[in-house]
Image (cartoon, rainbow, N blue to C red):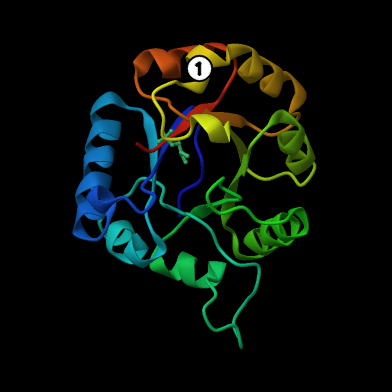
Amino acid sequence: MNTLTFPILITNFKTYESSTGVKALELAKLHEEIAREYNVNFAVCPQAVDIWMVASEIEIPVLAHHFDAVTHGQFTGHIIPEALKLAGADGSLLNHAERKIPFPQIAESIKRAREVGFFTVVCAGNIEEGMKIATLKPDAIALELPELIGGDISISTSSPDIIKQAVHKIKGVPVLVGAGVKNGNDIRIALELGARGVLVAS
Ligand code: G3P
């Protein structure tokens, strides 16, 4: 069972064709190789259906995209943290901009995650949301400005002040940043401003 080690780079595989099925495994193995070679902390975040295959073959942390705040029982169609953990996931993202959930559900999900020994990286679309989520004490908060996700402009170069403020105002929980992060310079800026890691995809 892995925990989060900072500074960390988490790659969200989303539902891109290039990171689905056997390609998810290839991409995850590449992350592991690079993490070993450069002695850096990488984690991968494949689709739920690919977790078992990926987690069986690699040792770096594996996160799910999302899970539901329910448990074993009559919950057809739900994804429970117990099942993700048995499949080899170490934790999960929650509340990603592409999979938002209401605040009470975030609270219940973090509680459920603690019950099963699962870490949570909860996304926030702005500093205020991040501050509110920080009261729930997830393992990390990932600040992603929704309008920059998938684009060519990074949060690091376009909004360094937001990173600085986020790190200052979101207390007691490591802050990661993401959205448009593309290269070493974006990562360097984020870390220099106090972020504990980045979340990347495209
Ligand atoms: O979860 C990470 C993601 O939303 C950032 O996406 O494509 O801007 O790196 P991207």
Q: Which residue is mark 1?
A: 156
Q: Which amino acid lies under the numbered mark 1 shown in the image of this protein?
A: Ser
Q: Residue at x 55, y 54 (%)?
A: 99
Nearer to me, 88 or 47:
47
The relative height of residue 124 versus residue 72 in the rendered view (above or below) is: above
Q: Quadrant of ligand 1?
A: top left
Label 1 SS: helix
Q: Residue at x 44, y 20 (%)?
A: 153
Nearer to me, 188 or 125:
125
Q: Quadrant of the C terminus?
A: top left
Q: Quadrant of residue 25?
A: bottom left
Q: Quadrant of the N terminus?
A: bottom left
Q: Residue at x 64, y 12 (%)?
A: 161
Q: Residue at x 72, y 56 (%)?
A: 102
Residue 172 at what x, y percent from top left?
A: 74, 32
Q: Quadrant of residue 151?
A: top left
Residue 133 at what x, y percent from top left?
A: 74, 43
Nearer to me, 144 or 90:
144
Residue 23 at what x, y percent from top left?
A: 20, 53
Q: How many marks?
A: 1
